[in-house]
Amino acid sequence: MSTSLLPPSLPLIHGLTRDQLVEICRELDQPTYRARQIWDWLYHRFAADWSEMKNIPLGLRQALAQRLALASATITHTQSEAGEGTTTKFLIALPDGDWVEEVLIPARGRTTLCISSQVGCKFNCAFCASGQAGFRRNLETGEIVGQVIVAARSLGATPSNLVFMGMGEPLDNYDAVLAAVRIINDAEGLSLGARRITISTCGIIPGIQRLAQEGLQVELSISLHAPDDALRSRLLPVNRKYPLGDLLEACRAYAEQTGRLITFEYTLIQGVNDSPEQAHELACILRPIHARVNLIPLSTVAEFEGRAPTAPVVQAFLNVLERARINATLRISKGGGVDAACGQLRRRMIQTTDDGRQITDRRIQTTDN
Ligand code: SF4
């Protein structure tokens, strides 16, 4: 009885809530404690194969294996920066043979896992390899949870923080992402607190409005990157459908309804969005919102010609925001050495395999797990 990477003809066990697992055990004439034992194998011991579940009777394991698939994601490659405690990127093979990426980022005593919500992406943001590679499909709930499980297995513990900033737009796969958040948040499972989970969006207004109704304490992060419609539509084409004024109004309503602070990500690009005038404009549009701004100088990526501004320009931009009493922090993006912009590793992998050539980049290491 082993796991495989065949297409998932069976539902993924990591897509079930605890109550649903109890219900399946009941249908198999099993006591409730069996569901608790299986849940323990899934979320405390990160089991990768039914055969590991030694305290579950063989007959029950076989019955479960006929109804549910256990392996939803497998790490096929890792790529790490040199040194200990550094960023590691995982290429995850899915049962249908495609890949997504996730990144483990240790920083300030935390381990943040950045996961994917879709295979590829529809939204084509200017400096993103995932968008430029096109959209393939939504991830299922079990595949999203499975990314956390394979990372936890590799780490030997549940990551302390989770961000939906990998491949895909989480609010474009709303139901699967929210179901995964609830499973990851389950107090008797991974028990990752909602405040440690960040959903990042390029600005899907209906998703923001739905999220406000969920009663969850998750963090919301908006990829803003421009203080006006013309520039934002150039950098994030989604702005043509959900323009800045409407987006900011949805954010204001979200913050008011949930009492939560919203984070706005602003990637600084030399000569594009880094002038003091644009900093003033940014301060002006964010003033009515309970918000904080993360300023991130652009990391060089092959997909985009732009560069980061010089340090004095970055500081001048930050000074304008601070003088306007906008809560702003300068962040240096981690993982430049591991193609950390989402979609880069998958794209290299696809190019390699489509061409029928071997991987030549020695930074990519094949892993066993
Ligand atoms: S940044 Fe996010 S929303 Fe934009 S193209 Fe990339 S994955 Fe999609």
Image: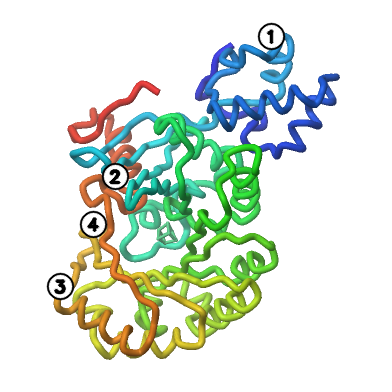
Locate residue 339 relative to residue 232 in the image: left or right: left
Residue 143: name its quadrant.
Answer: top right
- Mark 1 = which residue? 58
- Mark 4 = which residue? 301
- Mark 3 = which residue? 311
Residue name at image x 26 percent, y 50 percent:
335
Q: Quick one: label 2, few (<14), some, or many (20+) residues within 10 Å?
A: many
Circle 2 sits in a helix, a strand or a loop, which is it? loop
Query: Disc 2 versus disc 4: distance between alpha carbons?
Result: 17 Å
Q: Amino acid at mark 4?
A: Val
Circle 1 sits in a helix, a strand or a loop, which is it? helix
Quadrant of picture, ligand 1: bottom left
Where 44 sits versus 209, above or below?
Answer: above
Q: Amino acid at mark 2?
A: Thr
Image coordinates of residue 256 in percent, x first then y, are 62, 79
Circle 4 sits in a helix, a strand or a loop, which is it? loop
Tell me the tag on residue 87: 2
Sequence-earlier tag: 3 or 1: 1
Q: Say which of 335 and 31 sits in front.
A: 31
Q: Quick one: label 4, few (<14), some, or many (20+) residues within 10 Å?
A: some
Where 58 sits versus 249, above or below?
Answer: above
The quadrant of the rendering that contains the N terminus is: top right
Locate residue 70 relative to residue 114 in the image: left or right: right
Query: Disc 3 versus disc 1: distance between alpha carbons?
Result: 62 Å
Residue name at image x 46 percent, y 75 percent:
239
Query: Disc 2 versus disc 3: distance between alpha carbons?
Result: 23 Å
Residue 97 seen anywhere in this rendered image of the structure:
no
Query: Disc 4 versus disc 3: distance between alpha carbons?
Result: 19 Å
Q: Quick one: label 1, few (<14), some, or many (20+) residues within 10 Å?
A: few
Residue name at image x 60 percent, y 29 percent:
42
